[in-house]
Amino acid sequence: MKSADGPLTDKFKSASNKWCVYYLSKKGTLIVRIIRKFVSLMGRSKLDTCLASSEIVILNTITNGDIVHELRRRYKGVILTYVHELEVGASVFSSKLNIDNLIDTSDGFIVPCNAVANFLIRQYEVLPSAIYKLDYFIPLNHSGSTRSEARVLKDNLVVGGCGTGDWRKGIDLFLLVALRTRVYYPHHRISFQWKGIVKNSPEWIKISYDINKAGLSDFMTLLESDDKTLDFFEGIDVLLLTSREDPYPLVVLEAGSLGRPTICFEQSGGAKEFVGSDAGFSVQYLDTNAMCTGIVHYYDDRNLLYNHGSMARQRAERLHLDNQRILEEFNLILVESLAKKRLPL
């Protein structure tokens, strides 16, 4: 039995009604299996009651293909799928069969950026008219502090990276940029910090090994995963996004809301759409040399650092901090998807 609970359970409860529908497993004692069956039936009963009074169901992520047919059997209204994945993420966390089921069953798709929209069109031949772009909303839960002149004029530069230790986030590439910076610019006071790996996990142990072997122990710091991410962004000067694949990274938007520019790879997702040509640098995919060059540009030209950071903050405020505008766009998507469903064949 897979539990549907998780770290966001309480937040969902505070926003709306919440219940869990469990997968059934044949493992366990007879009593355990009977209890599972009873809990599952109760959950499905509540689900049926909710579906009966719903005009739209929104599935979150492309990985819900294993339940969408069961949902469609019970429900004839509009099904929208909010897709946050790209090629590798979809392949790793789901299967071709389940994704095909989801694509065929969904009436429309909500995406956070053009990169995801193009992925759906290219990979699954989704019609552009079935795709709705909706900007992420970032709650303004920080002090609103942005880069000050004093911070820009300081003589050191802190480069931050954020994420788990998996291949997609590219912490190994982050380390390579740090190593190149130290080797070729030894007199520049530049340090690197990565936040987001569980302390003493296998990923933590592996990257710590690399840091020590590369002689970067005094140059690159690992910060464990916790809920103080915004404090981390306030302590860095530039975000280095070494993700190989990241649909539309929230870390870029959060850093931008605090006036921190981003250096990222082209063709790795939607970060380039936010960064543009004036809120950071986008470099050729896997070109860690160019990333290093971008960092040094910021170190040598603090006005450029300040200007790019200011543009990132303005863009984040315009696109991702206006909850009323985003809510209105969301409502328009719902109205349009209902209208399309009701059109005569």
Image: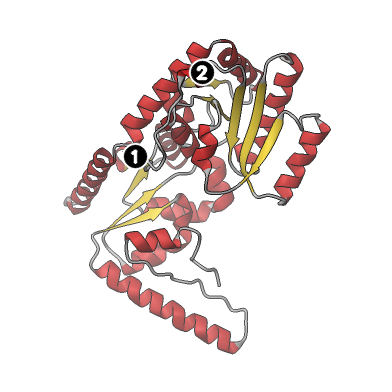
Q: Residue furthest bottom?
A: 31
Quarter of image, res 290: top right
- Residue 52 vertical placement versus 132 (above, below): below
Decide which of tag 2 and tag 1 comes sooner along the chain: 1
Q: Residue furthest front?
A: 150
Looking at the rendered structure, the kind of residue marked 1 is Leu
Tag 2: Cα neighbours inside 10 Å, few (<14), some, or many (≥20)?
some
- Against 186, residue 207 (above or below) is below
Q: Please identify, in this view, whether the residue under mark 2 or under mark 1 is nearer the observer.
A: 2
Front in this rendered view, residue 55 or 210: 210
Regarding mark 1 in the picture, which secondary structure is present there?
loop
**Mark 1 residue crowding within 10 angstroms, few (<14) / some (14–19) / many (20+):** few
Query: Marks 2 and 1, how far apart in space?
Result: 46 Å
Residue 183 lies, in percent from the top left, at 76, 18
Quadrant where the N terminus lies?
bottom right
Residue 291 placement, left or right of 343: right
Visible in this render: residue 192? yes
Say whether residue 12 is left or right of residue 243.
Answer: left
Report the residue at 20% width, 48% height from top. Answer: 335
Residue 127 disc label: 1
Q: Pick the residue in front: 17 or 110.
A: 17
Q: Which residue is mark 2?
A: 152
Q: Quadrant of residue 10?
A: bottom left
Residue 105 falls in image quadrant: bottom left
Place of residue 150 in the rendered image (x, y in percent of width and height, measured from the top left): 50, 19
Identify the residue shown where x is 49% and y is 24%: 261
